[in-house]
Image (cartoon, coloured by chain):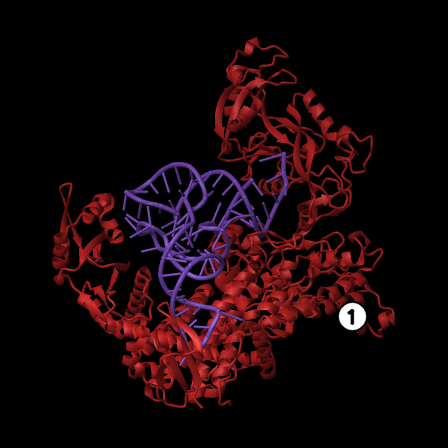
Chain colours: A red, B purple
Amino acid sequence: MASKYQEYNQLNLPQIEKDILVRWEQHQAFEQSVTLREGATPFVFYEGPPSANGLPGIHHVISRTLKDLVCRYKTMSGFQVKRKGGWDTHGLPVELGVEKTLGITKEDIGKKISVEEYNRTCRSEVLKYKDLWDDLTRKMGYWVDLKSPYVTFENNYIESLWWCLQELYKKGLLYKSVSIQPYSPAAGTGLSSHELNQPGTYKDVKDTTVVAMFKAKESAEAAFLFEAARKADPAAEVFFMAWTTTPWTLPSNLGLTVGANIEYALVRTFNPYTHLPVYVILAKDLIGKYFKPEGEDADFSAYNEGDKLIPWQILLVCRGSQLENIRYEQLLPYVQPEEGDPFRVIIGDFVTTEDGTGIVHTAPAFGADDNRVGKKYGIGILTLVDRQGKFLDNVGEFGGRYVKNYKSDPDYKDVDVDIAVKLKKENRAFRVEKYEHTYPHCWRTDKPVLYYPLDAWFIRTTALKDRMVELNKTINWKPAATGTGRFGNWLENMVDWNLSRSRYWGTPLPVWRTEDGEEEICIGGLEELRNELNKSFKAGVMEYTSGAAGTTSVDEYITHLTSDLHKPFVDNIILVSASGKPMRREPELIDVWFDSGAMPYAQWHFPFENKESFKQSFPADFIAEGVDQTRGWFYTLHALGVMLFDSVAYKTVVSNGLVLDKNGSKMSKRVGNVIDPFTTLEQFGADATRWYLITNASPWDSMKFDIDGIREVQRKLFSTLYNTYNFFAMYANLDSFTFKEAYIPLEQRPEIDRWIISVLNTLVKDVTGYFDDYEPTQAGRAVQSFVDEHLSNWYVRLCRRRFWKGEYEHDKISAYQTLYECLETLAKLMAPISPFFSDWLFGNLNNVSNRSKVNSVHHLDFPVVVSTAIDPDLEERMRLAQDISSLVLSLRKKVDIRVRQPLKKILIPVLDERMKQQVERIEDLIKSEVNVKGIDYLTETEGFIKKKIKPNYKSLGGKMGAKMKAVAAAISAFSAADIATLERDGQFNLLIEDDQLPIQLSDVEIISEDIPGWTVANKGALTVALDITITPELQDEGNARELVNRIQKIRKDSNFELTDRIQVKVAAIDSLKSAIINYNDYICTEILADRIEVVPELKDGTEIEINDLKFNVLVNKKS
RNA sequence: UGGCCUGUAGCUCAAUGGUGAGAGCAUCUGCCUUAUACGCAGCAGGUUACUGGUUCGAAUCCAGUCAGGCCAACCA
């Protein structure tokens, strides 16, 4: 225990943090903060695993600060908060990084480099920056358990994932199906959305587009159409018009999709190519695109082939819903689907009237929307293009032709054009034109991508949709809008989760299938896999040759085979089906989002181990990540929680916004505006950075990161608090204050002490509320304003004298205890956000006082509000004092009289007795603060006050409604007598347009903003006037104070000790003579001199100036 | 293209639908200080992105537009 408070010359936050870090590590402060709460209620936090494959950025600092401060706060609030760290290690970015490092492409894997070696590289590369991340974690003060993190590539982790998958499989939620995915025929591979988002993949291309005409069949549903058409022509043929930019998909057409609420028109006209009379259906809004206005209702009989103007006529209008299920003839009848009920009009929500005809040609094989709506209606599927991108042989004259020029054939003839020509000839095309649009291309081959049906494994999330929506409503989202909006909408429009990834480095799908797909098994754990392997060896599906992979027995070999649950090892495992057939693993890997979404289970290797740990840590009380995780981690956690345990996975989720650069642009390496967190931490320290990130804007708003903001925090908050501490330390050391005296009850302390303690407790209450509400921004701002406004610039400033004047007795001890309590409480309040500085502050205080036995502020309990210490009247009084002082200072400025010049009095009109009493109790404070001798209270009876009345819109608005304007005008026109009546009766009857409208005193605001004959200043209802008469006596006192001020400056410049006594000689100046005589005692006491010697002439000493007079003063230390 | 978020002083942020839109930073002027890198007072700075609407009253609610961002998609 130290006997003196450590004093410092300068605040050096980075240095403080380095020292504290050493201390934390010595004492295992983090581990202790957890063990000290052994047996307490757990507060469960999940760490979203970062990928150590990339470098940490400043945006990681904000989300981790958020996580850290909540965990620290909850720990101090009495919970036990374990924080298991984790690493996300699978996925495409890792693979792309490795490919870049090795200088290979995906095609080379398995050729130039074995899958085994490739994956080994991924495994070592993925934690490439782990040290850097650990360093950031340490330096920013993020307390998370990095000693036993979960790592998604570890066998145990994967085993838990397999268990999850098997659970889903058992529930019938895991299935294989085709999905429409981007596919590059030129490269012969599916493309991930990531690849599709590479720059330059979307290109402007000119394609041949066709508005095709699908001939409607007669049926009950279509009767109303034919009826209308046949009134004009008994032989009328009715067509649906549908536009396509990919005519090569037309042979695979199986449906026409319309919008249920879109209006469609049946139009009588002529085909512009064949000139035959036709009856076509299209969206009414799009008629203008295909028909000239002059042609409407033109004379049909006058039309001749080749006429520019084609007559047209709307025969009827109906809604899309009326067209549902009307059948039509197949447009290009080469092949029919084996299953389903095709060639119908169906309803889809994705149809718009932005372009085309409002009727969408639907080929379920070649569009995601098409496929979805097609499945819903069961229209089957036709895939008449093979994986090389050419038509199957059975597609008539087009068989075998490439749908796009995939082979860069110089003589390539566009199939789309030939299809268009054919349709034109057959009276099945209404318009054919070139159309420029953007279309995705394969980033590697530069050839257009097709959307193509590929096999994929899905999780049937849609089956649990309602439950997910329901449970989401119980989650506390910060901000709430993300939960209802972004996340809620996402859930509403949920589609089944496509798990399949055709890559190498990831969690393998644990499904083994026979070649015919008739039998399959989903493995849910290592032991099960080994058992199945055993069976397989017994059945001879797998064979063991002694010595294989250095093993001596089947068991050993099985152990070897299952030692790494990645490719290629798992693919070497062949299992045996019930009927004895070999089963091979489905080649897919699963989506990495499954890895992270299953972390509540897999981090504990549940259910194979740690069942108790899991039980206690599910669901999470709190998680936090960037808002970009809404449809990522937040979703997969939720989906798996609901599907596996019918539970939310987290109770509160905070999503923080992006960190942009100071101009509001996204940070990107390319632009070079990224902020390196290490530089920032090194320069300003973690605390200032953390404080800035948290208090500058609500975490969920995207924030513009500006270094100057950190500087400001450093100056305004930390420097101020540091100075307050240093001030305390300096005098407490002089007086040997160590808090050894008994705690002085508040009622025995002076008003100002009770005031700051009251404000402090209000602060504790507010901060606690904000933290409980996950509003750290508000909490930080509240602390900041307390430190700056109340503690430093009011309490300490006003109390300075108490610390250096007088004996070490009651009042002084009270001041020390009060300031100590403020500092100590602040250390605790700030601890969650700025863990280093607060621990430093706490340590400095506690080392001397030894009030707490713990060695870190983070092991303490969070302050609890002492309600009895809060005195709202007192706080109001002090606010009055501050306001009055501020007004007086402003008046002094206006008349240019400095504060050192005492003045006689100020005048304050008091509107009621209570106000007078309040001000009276702080009279002394105001008088010394603004240097006046007295305060006069003006009441109405003295006739000094001119009252002014203003309507209180808020209370009147509701009552008066539309009459508000008239009422406001009437009130503003009140005479002094009217105001008096209202004040006396508490009520007043307004007469507005013959209506009696009673108003109450609370409906108005009465202020006295003027005192006739005086210069006044106002703030709200408060008015102050200043008597600026300077009597000779006041002048003397002012001069005396000026002199004191100058001599103090000389003392300071001469580097005298605070306690040094001095000898003073002053040159005789007439105008100062009386001041020196009359205020001799005062001056001497202030400057610590025995007497002031006035000499006729003084050559030595320092020249000073008072009231424009220059003269010399000689100040010497008394020996 | 869709969903969502954001838009207030030069900058960063405030403002339960209640009427002269406030702080801090920065600039300028002056003052104060035996803790301070502080503070105090004053000056200046605004079409609350834009256009409409609802309302007695709109920065706030509604619709649309524009800009920035995130996510999802790119589909006829």
Residue A873 in percent (x, y) is at 27, 71
A976 sits left or right of A896 in the view? left
Left or right: where A524 falls relative to A558: left
Q: Secondary structure at mark 1?
A: helix
Q: Residue A481 at x, y = what percent?
A: 47, 54
Number of numbered markers: 1
Q: Quadrant of residue A281?
A: top right
> Could you classify mark 1 by the number of other residues whose Cα lies within 10 Å: few (under 14), some (14-19), or many (20 or more)?
some
Q: Nearer the viewer, residue B60 or A48?
A: B60
Task: Work out whether residue A544 can be spotted.
Answer: yes
Above-or-below relation of A1067 to A204: below
Which residue has dot 1 on it?
A558
Q: Nearer the viewer, residue A1095 or A613?
A: A1095
Name the residue located 80 percent from the left edge and 31 percent from the top edge: A412
Residue depicted at x 58% and y 61%: A59
Give me the residue at 39% from left, 83% from top: A1064
**Residue A492 at what x, y percent from top left?**
51, 50
